[in-house]
C-alpha cells in the first residue's frame, strides 16, 4: 500500500453482515463492533489489516484493539487470526499490544471464541462480560 493512499483514521459503517470499525491513529485504538459474516471477508478485513500493519510499522506507540464481536463466520475467524498473528509479531519485537474482547454475558459462545483466540497468543488479551 502506498503511503499517499493510506488514511490515518479508518471508519467503516456496519452492514447486516459486517461490523462497525473505527481506527484512530492518534489514540492507537481500533474498535470493531457487531457481527462478521460477509460473502467476501477480505473486502472489509483488507482495510483493517492494512491499517494495523501501517500503525505497527509507524513507531513504538502502543496499539489497543477493542472487540465487541457477537458472531464471526469461519472466514472472519481466519482474518482475525491474520490480525492477531501480526500483533504477536509486533509484541515479540517489544511493541505494547492490548486486546480487549468484550462479550454479551448472554452469549457464552462469544466468550468461548475469545478464549480460543487468547490461548494462542502471549500479548495482553483480556476477556470481559458486558451487559447489553
Image: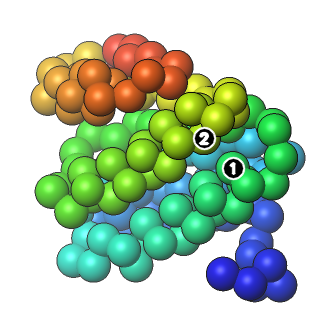
The quarter in which the N terminus is drawn is: bottom right
Secondary structure state at the residue bearing disc 2: helix
Residue 4 lies in quadrant: bottom right
Give the camera-side residue of 109 and 98.
98
Q: Which residue is mark 1?
A: 56
Q: How many badges with numbers are in the image?
A: 2
Residue 77 appears at what percent x and percent y? 25, 51
Q: Residue tagged by mark 2?
A: 90
- Disc 1 crowd rating (10 Å Cα; few below 14, some 14-19, many 20+) is many
Residue 28: which quarter of the image? top right
Q: Is residue 21 above or below residue 84?
A: below
Q: Residue at x 59, y 32 (%)?
A: 91
* CB atoms of marks 2 and 1 within 8 Å: yes
Instruction: Give how far across and how far down residue 2 sits, in percent.
Output: 74, 84
**N-terminal of the two: label 2 or label 1?**
1
Which image quadrant for residue 11? Answer: bottom right
Query: Badge 2 local density, few (<14 within 10 Å), some, or many (20+)?
Result: some
Q: Position of residue 37 (x, y in %)?
A: 22, 63
- Gap between marks 2 and 1, in whole Å? 7 Å
User: Residue 21 or 43: which is nearer the viewer?
Assistant: 43
In this orientation, does residue 132 appear? no
Q: Secondary structure at mark 1?
A: helix
Instruction: Tell which of 25 and 19 is nearer to you.
Output: 25
Residue occupying the point 62% across, 59% down: 53
Amino acid at each position: 500500500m502506498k503511503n499517499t493512499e493510506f488514511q490515518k483514521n479508518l471508519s467503516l459503517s456496519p452492514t447486516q453482515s459486517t461490523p462497525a470499525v473505527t481506527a484512530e491513529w492518534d489514540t492507537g485504538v481500533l474498535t470493531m463492533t457487531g457481527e462478521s459474516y460477509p460473502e467476501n471477508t477480505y473486502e472489509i478485513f483488507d482495510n483493517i489489516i492494512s491499517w494495523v500493519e501501517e500503525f505497527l510499522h509507524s513507531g513504538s506507540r502502543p496499539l489497543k484493539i477493542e472487540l465487541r464481536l457477537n458472531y464471526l463466520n469461519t472466514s472472519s475467524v481466519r482474518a482475525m487470526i491474520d490480525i492477531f498473528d501480526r500483533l504477536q509479531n509486533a509484541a515479540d519485537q517489544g511493541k505494547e499490544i492490548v486486546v480487549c474482547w468484550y462479550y454479551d454475558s448472554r452469549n457464552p459462545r462469544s466468550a468461548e471464541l475469545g478464549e480460543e483466540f487468547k490461548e494462542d497468543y502471549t500479548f495482553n488479551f483480556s476477556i470481559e462480560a458486558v451487559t447489553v
